[in-house]
Image: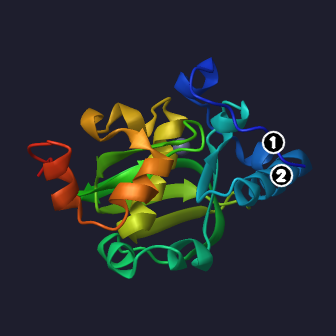
Amino acid sequence: MIFKILQTGEQVLRQKARALTVEEIQQESTQALIQQMQNTLRDAPGVGLAAPQIGLSLQLVVIEDRPEYSQSLPASLAAAQERQPVPFHVIINPYIAEKSGTATFFEGCLSVAGLVALVPRANTVTVKCLNERAEPVTIHASGWYARILQHEIDHLHGQLCYDLMYSRSLISTENYRKYWLHQSIEKTCKELQIEKLSP
Ligand code: ZN
């Protein structure tokens, strides 16, 4: 089964999601939900899907950055983004315990289809959460994986990446690929007249 991915304007995308109990995580229905979220993520395709995006106000996220996704990027961009494939995994009741550095790149969201924007994020994060077996896990991530984690955890707090964007950088995905994908962020900022990126 593939879920319909809700678009911005649905109230659930702006609500704070609730934590799952260990018992709930271990239930068969939750395991089936995780499987269906994985199917939905691959179908989209995307690199992360949070339960509120399918209408469930729960602190549950699936993540997977498949190798073919970064292979289609310009090599210089993939290197700048520190983008590495991330195997499929589940984070439940996550929180960011530590973060440092800043990186700014174009970012999109499956719940705001067809648009991307420059979003500043921490470059390194430590996330504490439970996995799909309700075991405690600590994740140390940097680069694009750190961005995915921050984006998805924001969803659990009712925040969308457009809350953090440089508003002048909001552009269609089609025009992003046409005009901006192959040039540096510095040049892009100059041409979009974005004066200064966050430190
Ligand atoms: Zn999103």
Label 1: state its secondary structure: loop
Corner quadrant of residue 156: top right
The residue located at (57%, 71%) in the rendering is: 69
For label 2, the crowd category at 10 Å Cα-Cα, with few meaning under 14, some 14 to 19 and many 20 or more, is some
Distance between the alpha carbons at the discs numbered 2 and 1: 7 Å
Q: Position of residue 197 (x, y in %)?
A: 14, 48
User: Which numbered marker is on residue 36?
Assistant: 2
| Apparent side of residue 199 relative to residue 157 in the rendered image (left or right) | left
The picture quadrant where one finds residue 7 is top right
Q: Earlier in the sequence, mark 2 or mark 1?
A: 1
Q: Check disc 1 and report the residue beneath it.
A: 3
Looking at numbered disc 1 in the image, what kind of residue is underneath it? Phe
Question: Quick check: 89 left or right of 38?
Answer: left
Report x, y in % for residue 51: 67, 40
Q: Is residue 101 visible?
A: no
- The spot of residue 94 in percent (x, y) is 52, 49
Please tell me which residue is depicted at 28% across the width and 55% down the height of the picture.
122
When the figure is inspected, residue 38 is found, relative to residue 113, above or below; the finding is below
Is 8 situated above or below 115?
above
CB within 8 Å, label 2 to label 1: yes
Q: Position of residue 131 (x, y in %)?
A: 65, 60
